[in-house]
Image: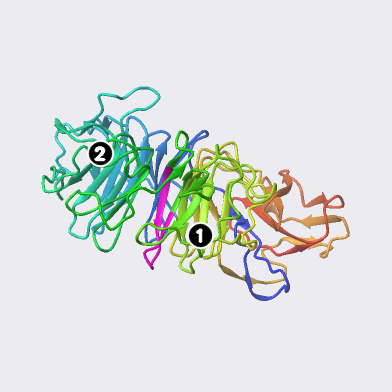
């Protein structure tokens, strides 16, 4: 029988009623069933609470249920034969999947395929021989990394390639709804290097970011790392020609987000923008000039770190994920939230964050919880293989009472607590975490135990939360030490 994990609902000032859960704390009810060493590069959420993740793991793509379990009704067969870098859900529910794979479920599909909502291949999407790169190598493989869909169904595709279906195409194309090349889009020679990210504006213009030095076949540093493209493929003359990211030899733009006011958030690897210190995150006005109302003082200290992913909350707050081991202070690692003005949001507490790797994808679910994907293996010392879900802006009912036969005594704790257990809890696991989500106790319940003693005397005074893993669902209560 599948084990189900539960956590205590908790309050910071009360034991009863509705209370705010700690933003940034791990959601232990979500246990993604991905194998060890999974690397999640893209996340797309569905309205029913499911999530589709793509990356470097077996089959390259998976659909997960709301509790993280694999959805076996997602009929992908053997899936992709190599990495999936981007998953984009179309308004009709079909899935555009890009990466550096050559086939999907045994069918030739060079770097791009479209799936039906059930995971089967859409035979109406005809890309011919697909994408290829004559410059591909083990270090820089040909890849589709970015996808944007117009309201009319036409599809922008960016990455590192120099041909589409046998036709020269440098790193950016627009496809018709059926997957054929849209010849009305003429980007010239497009970019000289890889496009990492893109976002489509409401006016139909396309923002692209990457490690390229020029756009449109122009010689020299013309539109380096960032460009805005008109619907016909020409560079937008209303967007500042030459935004200077530096130092030029290490800079690149790896993430983009468009605010509702059309201001542009840019993340990547850079130390200054147009001569102004701006380490790894900056906000531009719609014309490409610097937004001076955005704080630039609380950023990553090292040029060799970068912002890999940006997500915007409905309240205007900004989530960032990157490679910085110390961000703002030594206690903030790899994931951070900024207020709308760029000031660090101290109410978002991640503890020591992800370990073993970095976050590369951030996505908000409809219930405001945050899905974080990457190549990490744990979050606040709790095992997670490349995917974790965090609490964010939720409330929960708090009941300080005995439930389902589990008793904690004494509560508040004086150091030693005893858990009185029913037979249903035997052979389960108990984990206690602090308010930052750091695991402080993990204990296995024996098959004959009716009482489990736990020593918290070495822990600071405060609130703790109990998670119980057993063969049935159990609620529990807050633990005060």
> Residue beneath label 1, please?
318
Residue at 32%, 50% in the rendered image:
241
> Is-magenta flag for residue 257?
yes
* Residue closer to the observer: 18 or 467: 18
Q: What secondary structure predominates along the stretch shown in magenta? A: strand
Q: Give coordinates of residue 209: x percent, y percent.
A: 36, 45
Disc 1 vs disc 2: which is toward the camera? 2
Q: Which colour scheme is used?
A: rainbow
Q: Label 1 vs label 2: CA separation?
A: 34 Å
User: Is label 1 in a helix, a strand or a loop?
Assistant: strand
Residue 73 appears anywhere in the view: no
User: Around disc 1, counting alpha carbons within 10 Å, would you say few (fewer than 14), some (14 to 19), or many (20 or more)?
Assistant: many
Residue at 41%, 38% in the rendered image:
55
Residue placed furthest toward the left: 183
Q: Does residue 40 appear to the left or right of 453 in the view shown?
A: left
Q: Give coordinates of residue 145: x percent, y percent.
A: 34, 40
The circle on residue 162 is none
Residue at 51%, 38% in the rendered image:
375
The first of marks 1 and 2 along the sequence is 2
> Is-magenta flag for residue 193?
no
* Residue closer to the observer: 390 or 5: 390
Q: Give coordinates of residue 469: x percent, y percent.
A: 63, 50
Q: Does residue 132 appear to the left or right of 178 in the view shown?
A: right
Q: Is residue 207 above or below residue 161?
A: below
User: Is label 2 in a helix, a strand or a loop?
Assistant: loop
Q: Give the range drawn in magenta.
A: 253-265
Query: On the image, which quarter does residue 127 sit in?
Result: top left
> Residue beneath label 2, please?
218
* Residue closer to the observer: 207 or 148: 207
Query: On the image, which quarter does residue 166 sit in?
Result: top left
């Amino acid at each position: 029988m599948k084990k189900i994990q539960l956590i205590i609902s908790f309050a910071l000032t009360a034991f009863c009623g509705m209370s705010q859960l700690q933003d940034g704390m791990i959601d232990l009810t979500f246990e993604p069933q991905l194998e060890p060493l999974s690397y999640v590069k893209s996340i797309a959420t569905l309205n029913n609470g499911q999530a589709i993740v793509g990356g470097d793991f077996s089959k390259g793509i998976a659909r997960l249920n709301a509790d993280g379990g694999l959805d076996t009704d997602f009929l992908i067969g053997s899936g992709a034969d190599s990495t999936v870098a981007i998953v984009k859900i179309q308004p009709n529910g079909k899935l555009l999947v890009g990466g550096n794979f050559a086939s999907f479920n045994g069918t030739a599909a060079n770097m791009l395929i479209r799936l039906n909502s059930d995971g089967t291949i859409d035979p109406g999407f005809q890309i011919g021989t697909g994408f290829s790169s004559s410059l591909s190598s083990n270090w820089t493989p040909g890849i589709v990394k970015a996808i944007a869909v117009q309201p009319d169904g036409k599809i922008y595709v960016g990455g590192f390639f120099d041909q589409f279906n046998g036709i020269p195409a440098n790193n950016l194309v627009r496809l018709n709804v059926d997957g054929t090349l849209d010849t009305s889009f003429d980007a010239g020679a497009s970019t000289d290097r890889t496009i990492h990210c893109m976002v489509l504006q409401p006016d139909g213009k396309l923002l692209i970011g990457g490690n390229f030095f020029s756009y449109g076949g122009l010689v020299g540093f013309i539109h380096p790392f960032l460009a805005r493209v008109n619907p016909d493929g020409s560079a937008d003359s209303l967007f500042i020609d030459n935004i200077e990211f530096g130092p030029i030899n290490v800079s690149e733009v790896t993430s983009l987000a468009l605010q509702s006011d059309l201001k542009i958030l840019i993340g990547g690897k850079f130390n200054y923008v147009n001569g102004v210190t701006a380490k790894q995150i900056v906000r531009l006005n719609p014309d490409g000039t610097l937004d001076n109302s955005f704080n630039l003082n609380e950023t990553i200290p090292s040029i060799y770190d970068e912002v890999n992913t940006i997500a915007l909350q409905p309240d205007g707050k900004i989530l960032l994920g990157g490679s910085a081991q110390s961000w703002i202070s030594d206690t903030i690692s790899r994931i951070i939230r900024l207020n709308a003005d760029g000031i660090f949001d101290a109410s978002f507490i991640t503890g020591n964050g992800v370990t073993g790797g970095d976050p590369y994808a951030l996505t908000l679910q409809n219930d405001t919880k945050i899905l974080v994907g990457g190549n990490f293996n744990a979050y606040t010392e709790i095992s997670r293989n490349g995917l974790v879900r965090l609490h964010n802006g939720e409330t929960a009912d708090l009941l300080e009472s005995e439930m389902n036969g589990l008793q904690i005594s004494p509560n508040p704790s004086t150091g030693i607590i005893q858990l009185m257990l029913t037979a249903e809890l035997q052979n389960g696991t108990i984990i206690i975490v602090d308010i930052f989500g750091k695991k402080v106790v993990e204990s296995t319940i024996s098959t004959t135990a009716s009482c489990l003693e736990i020593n918290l005397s070495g822990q600071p005074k405060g609130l703790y939360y109990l998670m119980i893993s057993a063969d049935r669902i159990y609620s529990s209560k807050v633990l005060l030490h």
